[in-house]
Image (cartoon, helix red, strand yellow):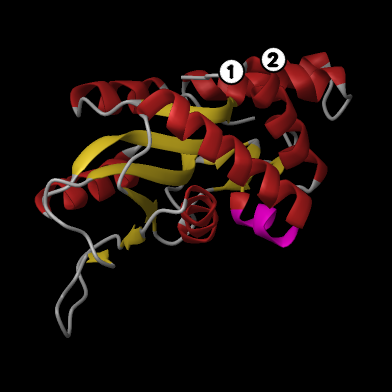
């Protein structure tokens, strides 16, 4: 869910400007899942641009307080959201933890790294939502550690139906700074893509697992 349209448009433009999001309908990318995709998103690039990472930090911090109220802890999902999560925790003056994809195989075998007490209110920070599976595994790990997860906020979402269904089934509230619809509208307006390419990108989103050019 988008909380602020102006933020959604500005975030999309910033991501396009620094090539954190690349659109290439005529020469698709191959995702790790095996899907062919006309879009590739690497929001970790935002950390290399101080003005942009600070903008994302500020928007995250503002929206977290407005949507969820000030939590006790900020949690970042490893590895993509650790950097921005720390910035948000620092801005809000809150403790920070991060969640591994799976428990460590050695030592204390932690999946949640950092100091977290049972019953603490946690907001989870993510960089990107595709199917939502890895993000929701992080939420589950936090709950198993005794956290009260208030919700999740991410930089960008592809808006797949399967992701919406997954978050609904897990009863986890999700907000994102920007999403696919705002990205495509802005990309056409700013001439990153043509209207014909916009149609291709819209078709891909309907069935990403089977799409091909």
| Element type where label 2 sits in the image | helix
Q: Report the disc number at residue 203.
A: 1
Whether residue 44 is visible: yes
Q: Position of residue 16 (x, y in %)?
A: 76, 39
Q: Are marks 1 and 2 in contact (CB under 8 Å)?
A: yes
Q: Which is nearer the eye, 123 or 162?
A: 123
Magenta residue check for 158: no
Q: Position of residue 193 (x, y in %)?
A: 82, 26
Q: Residue at x 52, y 19 (%)?
A: 3
The answer to whether 153 is drawn above or below residue 147 in the figure is: above
Apparent side of residue 98 relative to residue 83 in the rendered image (left or right): left
Q: Residue at x 15, y 75 (%)?
A: 109
Residue 128 numbered tag: none
Q: Which residue is mark 2?
A: 199
Magenta stretch?
44-49
In front of the other: 140 or 67: 67
Residue at position x 61%, y 49% in the image = 43
């Amino acid at each position: 869910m988008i909380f602020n349209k102006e933020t959604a448009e500005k975030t999309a433009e910033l991501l396009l400007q620094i090539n954190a999001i690349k659109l290439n309908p005529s020469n698709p990318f191959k995702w790790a899942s095996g899907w062919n995709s006309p879009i590739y998103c690497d929001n970790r690039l935002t950390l290399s641009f101080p003005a942009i990472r600070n903008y994302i930090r500020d928007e995250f911090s503002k929206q977290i307080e407005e949507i969820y109220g000030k939590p006790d802890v900020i949690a970042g999902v490893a590895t993509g959201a650790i950097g921005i999560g720390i910035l948000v925790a620092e801005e809000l003056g809150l403790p920070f933890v991060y969640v591994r994809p799976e428990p460590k195989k050695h030592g204390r075998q932690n999946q949640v790294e950092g100091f977290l007490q049972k019953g603490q209110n946690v907001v989870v920070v993510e960089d990107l939502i595709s199917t939502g599976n890895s993000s929701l595994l992080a939420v589950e790990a936090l709950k198993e550690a005794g956290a009260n997860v208030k919700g999740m906020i991410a930089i960008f979402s592809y808006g797949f139906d399967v992701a919406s269904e997954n978050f609904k089934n897990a009863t986890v509230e999700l907000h994102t700074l920007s999403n696919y619809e705002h990205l495509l509208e802005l990309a056409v307006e700013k001439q990153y893509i043509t209207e014909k390419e916009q149609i291709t990108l819209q078709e891909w989103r309907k069935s990403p697992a089977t799409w091909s050019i």
